[in-house]
Amino acid sequence: MGVRLSLRRREQLLGLALIAPTVIFIGAVVIYPVAATLGLSFFSENLLRPERGTQFIGIDNFARIFRDDLFWMGLKNTVVLTAAAVIGEVVLGMIVALTLNAPFRGRGVIRTLNILPWVVPSFVAAFIWIWLFHPQFGPINQFLVWSGIVDQGIPWISQGSTAMGSVIVVYIWKGLPWTFLVLLAGLQSIPEEWYEAAKVDGASPWQQFRYITLPSLRYILVIVIVLRTIWTFNNFDLVYLLTGGGPARATVTLPLNVYSTAFLQYDFGLSAAIAAFMVVVVLGLSIVVLKLSRIETES
Amino acid sequence: MTSKNLSRRRLLTAASVGAGSVAAMAALVGCGEVQTVTERVVEVVTKEVPVEKVVTREVVKEVAVEVEKVVTQQVEVAVEVEVEKVVEKTVVEERVVTKVVQGEAMQRKIETVTFWDFETRALGVAAQEAWLARAGTHAAVRVERLRVPFPEMEPKVLAGKASGTLPDMVWSQPDSCWTWAAAEIVAPLDEVHAEIGVNKFGNNPLEATKLDGVSYGVPQFLWPHIMYYRMDKYEENGFDEPKTWIDLGENGAALNSPPDHYGFFTYLKDAHPKLAWNLMPAFDAYVFDRDGSVALGSQGTLGSLILAAALFSISPPGVAGNDEGAGRTAFLNGLASHMTSSTSFSTGLAAAPDDLLSKVGAVAQPSVIGDAAGLAGMNILNITTGTKHPDRMMELFVSLFDHEIYQGWFISTVLGWAPTLRSVQEGTDYWESARVKPVARLVRTGVEASNKAWPSGAKFGSEGASLLGTVTARNVLKDMFTKVSDGGAPEAALEDATAEVERIVADAG
């Protein structure tokens, strides 16, 4: 004899059945790995010391990373790189978006070309810039030597004083198209009448930008800044390919730290602790985004 | 003891154990009722297999009869003179030698063993497979080769240990050999060396396979770092062959003319700090002592940093961004007069246009303190602790390092590798072979260098071996030299590096 369920109960079960695949999928590919990594950060797990096995060590891994110069160097560089790259991308992205929002002949072509750095894979971008920066054969140095500005090429990405600056330039170059596109989309959503009314009232271009454009783009700017901050903070491939964190740690970042600790030192527990720290930072930024979007929706 | 002897002995042992078991079974089951006992009989199979082509030279003696006419006082006398004439005739022929293979190898079941290998070059792969197959015939094994890219080998091996899926054999290099030995990934091979013959290898290459006095691998081939220099520029300037670091430094400085030409090409970008491993041994400087204590902060290390600073000043800018490959390209293009590189650079030099090979000289790197100098690049074959065929692996290794089999492989493999077997080093067949002869002087320099080269910046000892991986992964040595290349004081760079190594030791407990 079958069990008779109420309509409401059946609807509840159907709903659960429909969302179950998504929940299982997210649980398997998102929640489990993150939880496992966070859990691992409280254990010692070093493949080079198999005799020690896996032991619960509480917060020892965190204590170790906080007294490690390499961690602090990585954190400092990550913050510097992220801040400089995001500021550069947003400022330049705004300038480019404003320029390409104005009507002129060939605008479509230039808009398309502007997207190129975004579509180029990171490893290609890295090799292009390694070549551009090359001390002997790179066009930048060849021009500088040819024009007599320097006697011999500058090793842009392989000397401590210029490496971080050069890496920031590449990050801005790579991230600019996305920032520009999003801002351009925002600019196109601002009604033209507002500018016409402002002109009639005698507003200067700066005043139009200050009092119409910026306030209208406020929400988009926040999203752009927060997302670019999260992406740059987490980015591994570009800096790894460009400098590998060198010279002498001048460009080492937290993602590089996580990688080298896990896959070169094989200390997975310690690596998980650095990753957990990053998760907390990125989670904090994500909460900021969610809060801001809620405020915007309510307003 | 040869592989055949070994195989025969093993087979006899196995046969006696088998016969004993059958007898014991018969005795047990024979109590009371009649039982059928099946006895396994190993049949001797004789098989004819064509194995090789042989080119022979023959000397044929020919007897000719000539008639000479001698005129004496207008009288013609015919004299027959018998002249023995030796005609040297070179006959080149191909012939199929039929070799009768019989005995233990043919009687045994072929076992499949696995090998994780990071060789990628087509020639190297083909030669290696042929070598393994030939030796495998003697040991009754088929070697199944799995190619593992070099950067992935270490994590794969460590993961294999953790998951119990290690192959039967792997390739390593000295530093990874020690690390894996300390982690009980590779097995001690003193018994294999006893079978092969301990005197078959040079002392230094053999030492490089040892951890705490026990060998964990067999030296497979060498690629020692030697000092290449432009002989043509030396001749133009009347310089003698360099013998000391003072010679090299002075000659490099004299030839330095930036930005078109530099005295040296130094590089620091490679994953392994080759510059450190080239210079530190020359000053008898190492990261750890045998007991695992930190030995980095020595006067020797400081000396190597001061020498490095001098070399950086006559090198192209961007030392930290250059790797060995960039150095070779620069050297081939005439950008620098000196560079250290492995003997495998011979391949590039042999293929270079304008007969560059004849313009390049090579010497073993000089020592400053002690007898050691230069990086002893070497590949090692290891048997893992996860092997399921320890006896067969032992036989395979003995066969691989049999003179004929090894030399046959070496003549056909990648040009520029140097042999580890003394009998090949000291013989003439390898050096006189057509491919090797043009670069023989460079590879011979590598063999000479291997007698004093050191595998890396650590002395041996299980503690040091375990920690050296962390020191390398954290780029401690590379950063130490990079700081000097960036204008930093050698003393400060050494102090920072020593402090970090001490922290690594403290963290490791």
Image: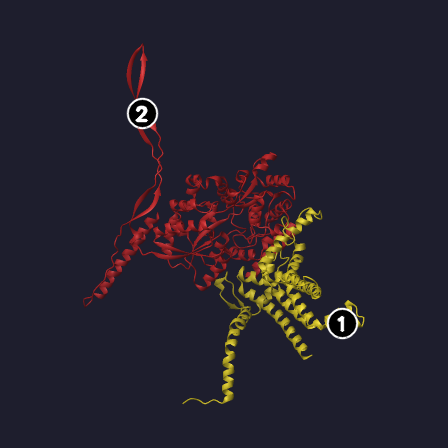
Chain colours: A yellow, B red
Q: Residues within 10 Å of mark 2 (few under 14, many from 20)?
A: few
Indicate left or right for B108 with B347 as reference: left
- The answer to which quarter of the image holds residue B383 is bottom left
Question: CA gap, disc 1 to disc 2?
Answer: 119 Å
B255 or B49: nearer the viewer: B49
Which label sits in the foreground, 1 or 2? 1
- Which residue does the numbered mark 2 point to in the structure image? B84
Residue that protrudes farthest toward the front in the picture? A105
Vertical side of A280 occupied by B484: above or below? above
> Can residue A76 be seen by looking at this rendering?
no
- Where residue A176 appears, as percent x and y from the top left, is 65, 63
Which residue is at a point 61% across and 47% down the rendered structure image? B308
Q: Residues within 10 Å of mark 1 (few under 14, many from 20)?
A: few
Look at the numbered disc 2 and give the secondary structure of its residue: strand
Vertical side of A129 occupied by A220: above or below? below
- Which residue does the numbered mark 1 point to in the structure image? A196
Say which chain tag 1 marks.
Answer: A
B108 or B500: nearer the viewer: B108
A2 or A147: nearer the viewer: A147
Contact? badges 1 and 2 (CB < 8 Å): no
- Where residue B256 appears, as percent x and y from the top left, is 64, 41
Indicate left or right for A105 with B443 as reference: right
- Where residue B102 appears, as percent x and y from the top left, is 29, 49
Q: Do marks 1 and 2 both belong to one polypeptide chain?
A: no
Say what amino acid the circle numbered 2 marks: Glu
Say what amino acid the circle numbered 1 marks: Glu
Tell me the quarter of the image containing the C terminus of chain B: bottom right
